[in-house]
Image: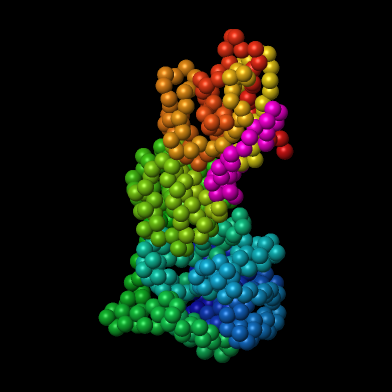
Amino acid sequence: MDLIKQTKENIKKYKLFRPKETLILGVSGGNDSVVLLDVLSKLTPLKLLVVAHLNHSLRGKDSDKDQEFVKNLAQKYSLKFETKTAKVANLSKAQKRNLEEVARNERYKFLAEIAKKYKTKKIVTAHQADDQVETVLLNYLRGTGPKGLSGMDFKSQITIDGNNFQILRPFLNIWRREIKDYQKKNNLAFREDKSNLNLEFRRNYLRIKIIPELEKQDKNFKTKIWQKSRQLKELMLSLDPEINKIYSEIKEKELPTAVSLNLFKFRLLGDNLKAEIFRKALFKIAGDLKDISQKHIMDFLETLKTGKIIVFPRQLRVLIDYDKVVLLKGSFKKFQPRTDCPLDEKIQKRELIVGRNRILESGLEIILTIAKFPDKKAFNFDFEKIKFPIFTRSVKPGDAFKMKNFKGFKKIQDLFVDLKIPQRLRYLFPIITDRNDQILGILGIRQGQEAEATKGTKRVLIIKFEGIKK
């Protein structure tokens, strides 16, 4: 089929964009993206096309020549041109992340910036059928789930800095050889990227070494992989409404960098549904599931234990509380559900004075006053019986105290368990102790029997707390 006709049918069938929508074209200068530009210039008003090129600075002068080539190409078609230079190798080293991954992330970040500038959500890339086969095989080797094995789609969503964009792939069912034929027929100049021959990159190794060998065994190998990936994609799409419905029922909170799921409802699901709901939640905060393998998902499902913290790639973390699963992106300190308590911080031991004591770790002020009569809404101690100075700190292993209205000693960790206090918050409850580290009480939970005020108490030490006023 004629390439222009096939592309036009794809745009219509998959509803990629409407006639009056601005499109950001990712153009590397390679054969596929040059052909994409030429084809779309014949299908769409030129004023709606924006050529965008990111110089990755990976090939020295060759990268600069690519940039200049694409700039001249945009001028040839009388199209708007946007470009940027990124030191991808330096970023990869600084972030200690895979070079290909960093290059991809920087490219999409750049394309999203340009899309925002032109007030559009539509980003068009030149991914084609061979790319799809390579992606599916790579995902298989990584141990991905069903969505990874279904590969790319003609239209998919990507979230960058909290903003959603659509990635459009009008060439996804068109083979590399067909695009090459079009390029030759129309005598289109393009740039060769020598790094595509570097066998150290797994994708290149698959394309150059593995796939040709498999095609010797079965000449229809690539077609079969593409068709199976499409069937799986359509199956996953048909399940999406049900998965979305279940997700909305289980989801408690959703923020750009955090998602909270109801643990009790989550546990009622079968493992396959659990995996899909979990992937969806991860996708919400990560923007994609690159580097999240099936093993990561299975490890999570096998360790649904209260108090467990699981670390995933790309600063993704999962915290399992008594009643919820909390998924976070970034360090715990960036997510503050105290609503803004740092999750990995403890109260540093400090002496308390009469008056106001700021406990920044918990976002509290502990207030000590001396009075003649007790305060029913606070802890009340006999001033004469307390062994001063008194301190506040976080709970420590083995901490126990004589609780008010309780016989014998009670372990504080057991009390936390009884009260179903989330693991992540336990260190933020101020423990009040005397000079001998004898526990007087846990603010917000229970007062101890030690030095408790009685009817005969002449001076009452009142201890209460309130949130720090900003």
Q: Is residue 214 above or below residue 359?
A: below
Residue for point 50% across, 70% down: 98
Magenta stretch contains residue 348:
yes
The answer to whether residue 54 is visible is no
Residue for point 39% across, 54% down: 297
Colour scheme used in the picture?
A: rainbow
Residues rendered magenta in the picture: 332-358
Residue for point 31% across, 79% down: 214
Which quarter of the figure is the N terminus placed in? bottom left
Magenta: main secondary structure equals: loop
| Quarter-of-image position of residue 74 | bottom right
Tell me residue 272's x, y (percent).
35, 50
Q: Is residue 309 above or below residue 163?
A: above
Tell me residue 462's x, y (percent).
64, 21
Residue for point 55% across, 18% down: 452
Depth check, front residue: 355 or 78: 355
Left or right: 219 as drawn, with respect to 108: left
Left or right: 10 as drawn, with respect to 266: right
Q: Is residue 407 above or below residue 15?
A: above
| Quarter-of-image position of residue 150 | bottom left
